[in-house]
Image: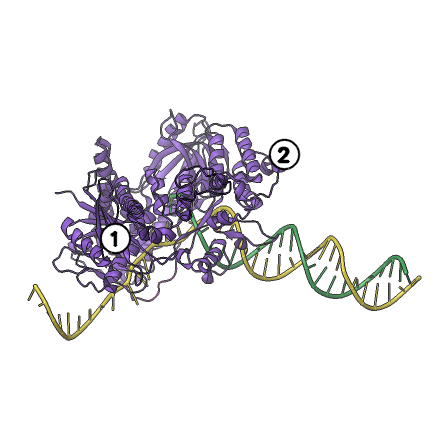
Chain colours: A purple, B green, C yellow
Amino acid sequence: MAPFRILSFDIECAGRKGLFPEPTHDPVIQIANVVTLQGCDLPLIQNVMTLKSCSPIVGVDVMSFDTERDVLLAWRDFIREIDPDIIIGYNICKFDLPYLLKRAEVLKIAEFPILGRIRNSRVRQYGVRKSKEISIKGRVQFDLLQAIQRDYKLSSYSLNSVSAHFLGQQKEDVHYSIISDLQNGNAETRRRLAVYCLKDAYLPQRLLDKLMYVYSSVEMARVTGVPISFLLSKGQSIKVLSQLLRKAKQRNLVIPNVKGQGSVSDTFEGATVLEAKAGFYEKPIATLDFASLYPSIMMAYNLCYCTLVTPEDARRLNLPPESVHKTPSNETFVKPDVQKGILPEILEELIAARKRAKADLKEAKDPFERAVLDSRQLALKISANSVYGFTGATVGQLPCLEISSSVTSYGREMIKHAKKIVEEKFTTMAGYEYNAEVIYGDTDSVMVQFGVQTVDAAMKLGKEAADSISGTFTEPIKLEFEKVYFPYLLITKKRYAGLYWTNPEMFDKMDTKGIETVRRDNCLLVKNLVTECLYKILVDRDVPSAVQYVKNTISDLRKNRIDLSLLVITKGLTKTADNYAVKTAHGELAKRLQKRVASTAPNVGDRVPYVIITAAKGAKAYERAEDPIYVLENNIPIDPQYYLKNQISKPLERIFKPILPDPLKELFHGSHTRAVSMSTPSNSGIMKFAKKQLSCLGCKAVISGSNRTLCSHCKGREAEFYCKTVANGNFLFLFLSK
DNA sequence: AGCTTGTCGTCGACACAATTATTGC
DNA sequence: CTGCACGAAGGAAGCAATAATTGTGTCGACGACAAGCT
């Protein structure tokens, strides 16, 4: 099969100065395209289509046009000539594509939206208000923003920060307010804009390649039987439904349409989380996991829509007890010899295929092949796990709480059973050296302290326990020994940290769950501080050094020596400010920003970055939240006390609690807490750089006057250089959205 | 006039429930 | 292949758990103030 042709593109629009471009008013001024073949590193074609003249760029085909109409039509012709299989970009499905269509409509270019592969098929836009869906027949659209938002949890999803995260490189950020200036300048400034635009087309291609999206998407589409476009535009349930339909057709069964069947609004009981015996464990903790718990339960007990026996069915059919399973939630399902379920069959296939993929993965040496196989096994795992969720989705296509509540009820029994067996079997009475103790467990796992001192011994006992307990369950339910934590810091349910060992020689990594280190709603300062402390405690086993590190950080914070970027907190905006029942910092800030500059204000679904500034005593946090860039620009003082009290003290207290007798006293009381100063961020490193630079930030010429950042030549391009400078300072990308 | 006493409002501390965001599995 | 009439549609995995913050209510301390007493 010929390799896919992939087109990555980005458009720039001239907005009225400082505002987001409106497709009804503001023209498309540049389109950058990068064409690659799947599997090839070098771009096949790189070009830029611009309005008005533009200086040449080495290696790039720069095409200048007199009218916007010519630019759009040139792009249409380019698409038809290149005939790409996949069209990608960043936020193309919500911005670039609808914008182009709208412009063509405004300019009355009826012949523009003929981009598909079916002759004369027009590009169609579905949905008027909220969801814009554009169909280009025969070509797959793949929006990297959507993909990354779906697959990765990041603090910011700007192309800049995403590129920094995955590719280790940043783009040249051009402030939205100067795009018009660059366009209205000369051929040279338009060249600058073109380079920027081209980079925005190039980065999505790099991301697609690096994250192996083509492989994983094709695999996922293949195993679940949905089009690739569904993977980004629709949820999990469509995949399960697709598999169900596929299987049902083979069996000559029909699936009822139950959607209009009133509101099944009640919820069902989920999994058991064992009580966490909090503490710092300096003995190895073995972790036993049920492999694919919920799928194996559904297979073991033949749970399916077509095996469920309702009370009426039971009366009518009068089934003998030996041909049914009675679940702990008191539902009845027939055994496979009466009727084999569709869901177990789907799951069997998915799991068998995943096993093959894993085996292939082990064999594979070539990195390219490994990438394919790894994404394949991952796709199968995800598919298997979402089958249970589908049956419990009361607002979904085919809810069946009898199945989902049965699954969880079996799960609850099994984790309790596993705990009981471990604690009954591994005792001094039975000839073992120590009494084993289950210190924690969540849904499908038990953490066992066998009492032994070495990782090796814990592994041996773990394997023994897993094997003997597996034997007490129905096939294919299996308890596996997975890893050893040593040492292990258990804080509460769902929050712990430890060194993760899979072989007795060396630990694999430091693993943290639920703690501030893995949460996105903390500032970087807290995240870094907690990570560093845990590292010192768990890896170095040096508590005094961790304490000293905390003290130094507190001292720096008090003296305002912490970079502002480390103090930025981000939270997702889930609804508009008016719809919040209680006022929230990010919600109120979003409301204020909306009033300030509506075009750049955060929307629902965006993450809102903010810092806490000083204010009158007793002021609520939501009154003190402020946009980090606004804080920088206006030299507003931040509130170190807030960060000390509300951000870093509690998380540190929780971590040190099992280790130090009186953590608050040890960490927060002492000479390092005395040096209080109320300086503004202008004293911090980053702004010193920006304000007091003696050479011009634009052209690096030395400036004679003292209070200027730009020489007379570069005056007037402040915003552009501001962006560049801050981006180079490894700073702005952390929170500059859009 | 100077003191005592009672009332009233304010403030801070604290407990508690509700809301919100996020993660674990 | 094109044009027209007609009908349908939107669209969604789950629960358990922690922690921060807001909002509300209660309680006690404290000071201001006025009235009354010596």
Asked whether, in this view, residue A615 is left or right of residue A454, the answer is: right
Could you tell me the amino acid type at mark 1?
A: Lys
Q: Position of residue B5 (x, y in %)?
A: 83, 61
Q: Is residue A206 visible?
A: yes
In the picture, the disc for residue A671 is: 2
* Label whose residue precedes the other's in the sequence (1 or 2): 1
**SS for tag 2?**
helix
Q: Chain of mark 2?
A: A
In the picture, the disc for residue A52 is: 1
Quadrant for residue C38, please give it.
bottom right
Q: Chain of mark 1?
A: A
Magenta-tinted stretch: A262-266
Tell me: residue A551, above or below residue B20.
above
**Residue nearer the viewer, B7 or A106:** A106
Tell me: residue A544, above or below residue A378.
above
Asked whether, in this view, residue A38 is left or right of residue A174, the answer is: left
Tell me: residue A589, above or below residue A539.
below
Could you tell me the amino acid type at mark 2?
A: Ser
Q: Position of residue A92 (x, y in %)?
A: 28, 53
- Asked whether residue A263 is drawn in magenta, I would say yes
Q: Give the residue at x 58% y 52%.
A: A615
Q: Main secondary structure of the magenta part?
A: loop
Q: Give the residue at x 33% y 36%.
A: A480
- Please rate how many residues cluster around mark 2, counting C-alpha atoms within 10 Å: few if below 14, some from 14 to 19, many from 20: few
